[in-house]
Image: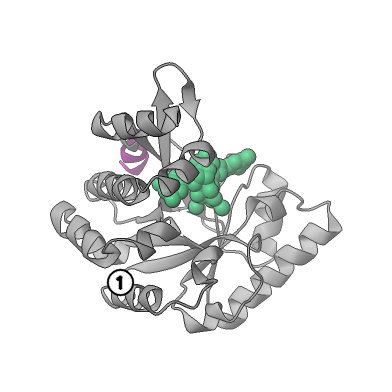
Amino acid sequence: QKLEMELWDALARQEFQVVYQPQFDLGSRKLIGVEALLRWPHPERGMVPPNEFIPIAEEVGMMEALGEWVLYEACREAARWPQPIKLSVNVSPVQFTRGNFVASVTKVLADTGLRADRLMLELTESLFVQECGAVRSAIDELKSSGIGFALDDFGTGYSALSYLRKFPIDAIKIDRSFVLGVPDDVEAMAIVQAIVALGRSLGIRLIAEGLETPDQIRVLQELGCQEGQGYGLGRPQPAQLIMELLN
Ligand code: G
Ligand code: G
Ligand code: MN
Ligand code: NA
C-alpha cells in the first residue's frame, strides 16, 4: 500500500532511472545493442529491485505510464548515440492489453526520432498464453513499422511453442538460469543446445543472458549462439557511459 503511493510520487518526480546493458556479437566482440533496464534509487530504501516494484506497478495500473516513460527515455538517449546500435526495451504484458500500446510506441518514435528498425521490444511468454486477437494485431502492426521482437526469459514460462511460428519473433533470449549451468551442468547444457537448435531451425536469432565467465561465453558461442550479454561482458550502465563506449 505504502510502496504503491511512493511509486506514483516517484514517477511524478522523475525518480526512476534507466541503465543500459551492452549486448555483443560473441564472434567479433562488437557492441551491437543495449538492453534498457529500469532502476529505482529510493531516497530511504536504497535501490529497489524491479522484481519488487514492477508487479506492484502492474497491479495498481501504473505500468502503462511507467513503461511509456522508460521507452521514451531510452529512445531519446539511443537516438543521440553516434552508432546505430539496437535498443531493447522490456515490455510488460499489461502494456499490450490496456490502453493503446501501438499509438504510444509510434508517438515515442516520432517524438524522439529513433528509427523503428533500431528498436527491439522484449516480450515474455506469458503474453502469448491466451490467444488474444488484440495482441496479435498490435504485434503485426508494430512489426510492419520495422520494430523487432525478442522473447525474454525463454524456457522459464509456458511450454507451448506454437506461438514461435504464429508471431513474428526475431530473437530468443536464453534465460540466465540455463546459462548459469554452462558448461558443467549436463541438463542445463542439454536445454541450451535444444533452444539453440530450435532458434536456428526457425531462423530466429539467439541472445544468451547472464554470461559471467569466459567459459560460458566461449561455450555458448561454440553451441551456435551468436549474441550475448552479462556481467562477464558488460554491466548495466548509465547512458553517458554507453555514449563514451561508442565514441
Ligand atoms: O535489471 P534487473 O535484473 O534487476 O531486472 C529484473 C527484472 O525486471 C527482469 O526480469 C527485467 O526484465 C525486468 N525489468 C527491468 N526493467 C524493466 C522495464 O523497464 N520494464 C519491464 N516490464 N520489466 C523490466
Ligand atoms: O529478465 P531480464 O533479462 O530482462 O533481466 C535482466 C536482468 O538481469 C537485469 O536486471 C540485469 O541486472 C541482470 N543481469 C544481467 N546480466 C547478469 C549477469 O551476468 N548475472 C546476473 N546474476 N544478473 C545479470
Ligand atoms: Mn529482458
Ligand atoms: Na531474462
Measured from the top left, where is residue 142 in percent x and y?
30, 71
Q: Which residues are magenta?
A: 241-247
Asked which quadrant contains residue 242, the reply is top left
**Residue most extreme to the front:** 1
Q: As shown in the figure, which amino acid type bears the numbered disc 1?
A: Leu
The quarter of the image holding the C terminus is top left
Tell me what residue is drawn at x 47 percent, y 26 percent. 47
Q: From the image, tell me which residue sits under label 1.
A: 142
For label 1, the SS is: helix
Asked which quadrant contains residue 186, the reply is bottom right
Name the image colouring: one colour
Above or below: residue 96 compared with residue 133: above
Measured from the top left, where is residue 176 in percent x and y?
64, 51
Tell me what residue is drawn at x 63 percent, y 47 percent. 211
Measured from the top left, where is residue 229 in percent x and y?
54, 49
Asked which quadrant contains residue 10, the reply is top left
Q: Is residue 243 left or right of residue 37?
A: left
Above or below: residue 140 compared with residue 176: below
Q: Is residue 28 left or right of residue 75?
A: right
Seen from the viewer's position, the closer of residues 153 and 210 is: 153
Whether 8 is among the magenta residues is no
User: How many numbered marks does the figure carry?
Assistant: 1
